[in-house]
Image (cartoon, rainbow, N blue to C red):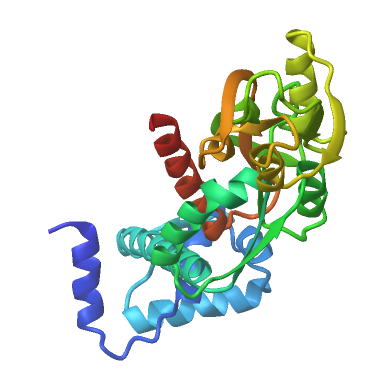
């Protein structure tokens, strides 16, 4: 029989006991701090009140838990059993509270998600569909915008999490954000499916100043192409439609370029990373963690196809 079982038997023979978690915490802190004055300070109670509480516990148990040696309070044999039981019970109570809190946060409430173009079309729907099976009662609010706008909204607490394009010079894993690479995809040069020699001279591209456009411009420059842009849009489906109608040449994410026929993919111009960013110093949010994990799963499946 271990010491906890012994203590439980003692409690069974004292059915009138009225010992609360507060009393158990008193015992634990007194044992750790060794003196009533130090323990009382940690607990935020007066020393006389703490001394009275210890006497009440000892009276209920019918045994001494502490013996005085100078200013220190040392455990008796019964006190050792009591404190070990107290520490174990307090730890399990804390785990229970945290578990219930996390469970409640996961299955209820609101989750605000920001996402860029292709993520809103292909990556996130699959992740959100899987998330719905885990937490069907969570209300999901989706905001579609460019990466810089989403980053600012996340910083201003308008979003819980955002899926954006990694900056051209790499992930900015600053003190404000924690970043995780979710997927990587090619940016492909696309032309209309029309007779050779009649390709349009106009270009339809992502807006100037956007992260994806910066990657495209750098890639086109590396192969000696200087596009004449007549249409700009952050919506890749609009850009693809311009190509399919024979009105323009474009550079599209692989997921968009290969989503149908009527265009010709000629070469890879650049690659972009889709990253998930969260506020680095915010308390852990189970809903965010679950969605990020599902996003990573979808990203791995996309890469494997």
On screen, residue 147 versus residue 276, left or right, reads right
Q: Quadrant of residue 20 in the image?
A: bottom left
For residue 304, above or below residue 31: above
Whether residue 280 can be seen here? no
In the rendered image, the vertical position of residue 77 relative to residue 100, given as above or below:
above
Residue visible at 45% across and 68% down in the picture = 135
> 213 and 73: which one is in front?
213
* Residue 198 sits in quarter: top right
Quarter of image, res 35:
bottom right
Extreme residue in the bottom direction: 16
Q: Position of residue 126 (x, y in %)?
A: 46, 53
* Percent of width and height locating residue 18: 39, 86
Give the quadrant of the N terminus: bottom left
Q: Which of 119 and 276 lies nearest the eye of the viewer?
A: 119
In percent of width and height, residue 159 lies at: 72, 58
Residue 42 visible in the shown view: yes
Q: Quadrant of the C terminus?
A: top left
On the image, the x and y values in percent for residue 110 come to 61, 70
Q: Is residue 67 left or right of residue 118?
A: left
Residue 232 vs residue 80, the one in the foreground? 232
Name the one closer to the observer, 295 or 204.
204
**Which residue extends farthest left?**
1
Q: Residue at x 80, y 21 (%)?
A: 217
User: Quick check: 157 above or below 197?
Assistant: below
């Amino acid at each position: 029989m271990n010491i906890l079982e012994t203590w439980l038997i003692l409690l069974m023979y004292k059915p009138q006991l009225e010992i609360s978690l507060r009393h158990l915490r008193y015992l634990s802190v007194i044992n750790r701090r060794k003196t009533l004055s130090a323990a009382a300070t940690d607990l935020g109670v007066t020393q006389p009140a703490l001394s009275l509480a210890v006497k009440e516990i000892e009276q209920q148990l019918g045994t001494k838990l502490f013996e005085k040696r100078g200013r220190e309070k040392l455990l008796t044999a019964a006190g050792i059993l009591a404190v070990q039981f107290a520490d174990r019970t307090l730890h399990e109570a804390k785990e229970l509270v945290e578990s219930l809190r996390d469970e409640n946060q996961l299955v209820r409430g609101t989750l605000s998600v920001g996402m860029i173009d292709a993520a809103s079309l292909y990556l996130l729907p699959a992740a959100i569909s899987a998330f719905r099976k885990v937490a069907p009662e969570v209300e999901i609010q989706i905001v579609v915008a460019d990466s810089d706008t989403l980053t600012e909204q996340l910083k201003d607490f308008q979003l819980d999490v955002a899926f954006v394009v990694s900056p051209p010079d790499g992930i900015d894993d600053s003190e404000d954000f924690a970043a995780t690479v979710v997927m990587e995809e090619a940016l492909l040069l696309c032309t209309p499916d029309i007779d050779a020699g009649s390709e349009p001279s106009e270009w339809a591209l992502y807006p100037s100043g956007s992260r994806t456009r910066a990657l495209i411009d750098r890639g086109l420059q590396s192969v000696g192409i200087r596009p004449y842009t007549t249409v700009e849009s952050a919506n890749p489906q609009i850009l693809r439609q311009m190509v399919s109608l024979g009105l323009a040449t474009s550079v599209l994410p692989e997921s968009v370029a290969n989503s149908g026929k009527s265009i010709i993919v000629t070469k890879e111009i650049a690659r972009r990373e889709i990253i998930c960013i969260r506020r680095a110093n915010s308390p852990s949010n189970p809903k965010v963690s679950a969605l990020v994990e599902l996003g990573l799963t979808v990203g791995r499946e996309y890469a494997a196809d």
